[in-house]
Amino acid sequence: MNRLHKDLNILVNRVEAWELSRVSAGPWRQKFHLMPPCGWMNDPNGLCWRRGNYHVYYQYSPFNAGGGLSFWGHWSSPDLLRWTQQPVLLCPDQPWDLHGVYSGSALVEDDTWECPDLFQVDGQWILAVSPQGIKPYGHIGQNVYSCGYFPFYG
């Protein structure tokens, strides 16, 4: 974690505390559905079960309710009913994500995180993945390339 990441987390925590104290009793505040303490929430994904809890990750702009600099927000739950907001997971703290950290999705299997994305191109379904933690065999599984794809038929 670099210094910018630490400072962005401090700033997000301050903004969330101030905004939540201002809006927590508001008539439009969600009581059952997930809602960030402030700002903008979009694209919830990375829904997974890991080490006894469900997790939801989402694009989160704590500084602007209309969108803006995007972070990854994070909620966890033991039962899908009681949710706990977790600290911001990813911050735009590197040169390559200076416009925001945009979400994709995540899958957890045996402590191996994959980033699947299923989409269609000209009627053909494609699954794109970024393999992590796979035992290498020759060039296979060495994550030489950041992403691979597989066409789906049927």
Image (cartoon, helix red, strand yellow):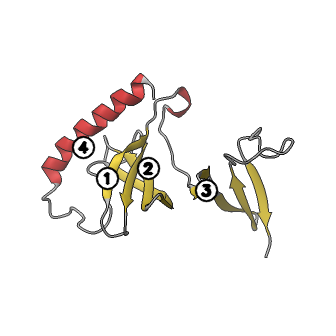
Crowding at dot 1, Cα within 10 Å, few <14 / some 14-19 / many 20+, comes out as some
Between discs 1 and 4, the one toward the N terminus: 4
Identify the element where label 2 is drawn.
strand
Question: In front: 95, or 135?
Answer: 135
Disc 3: which residue: 110
Q: Nearer the viewer, mark 4 or mark 3?
A: 3
Amino acid carrying label 1: it is Gln
Tag on residue 85?
1
Amino acid carrying label 4: it is Glu
Residue depicted at x 38% and y 57%: 76
- Expressed as whole percent of the image width and height from the top left, the position of residue 38 reads 27, 49
- Expressed as whole percent of the image width and height from the top left, the position of residue 150 reads 78, 59
Between discs 1 and 2, the one toward the N terminus: 2
Distance, label 4 to label 3, CA atoms, is 34 Å
Q: Nearer the viewer, mark 1 or mark 3?
A: 3
Disc 2: which residue: 59
Crowding at dot 2, Cα within 10 Å, few <14 / some 14-19 / many 20+, comes out as many
Distance, label 1 to label 2, CA atoms, is 14 Å
Horizontally, is 130 left or right of 32 in the view?
right
Amino acid carrying label 3: it is Asp
Q: How many marks?
A: 4
Tag on residue 143?
none
Identify the element where label 4 is drawn.
helix
Disc 4: which residue: 16
Amino acid carrying label 2: it is Gln
Distance, label 1 to label 3, CA atoms, is 25 Å
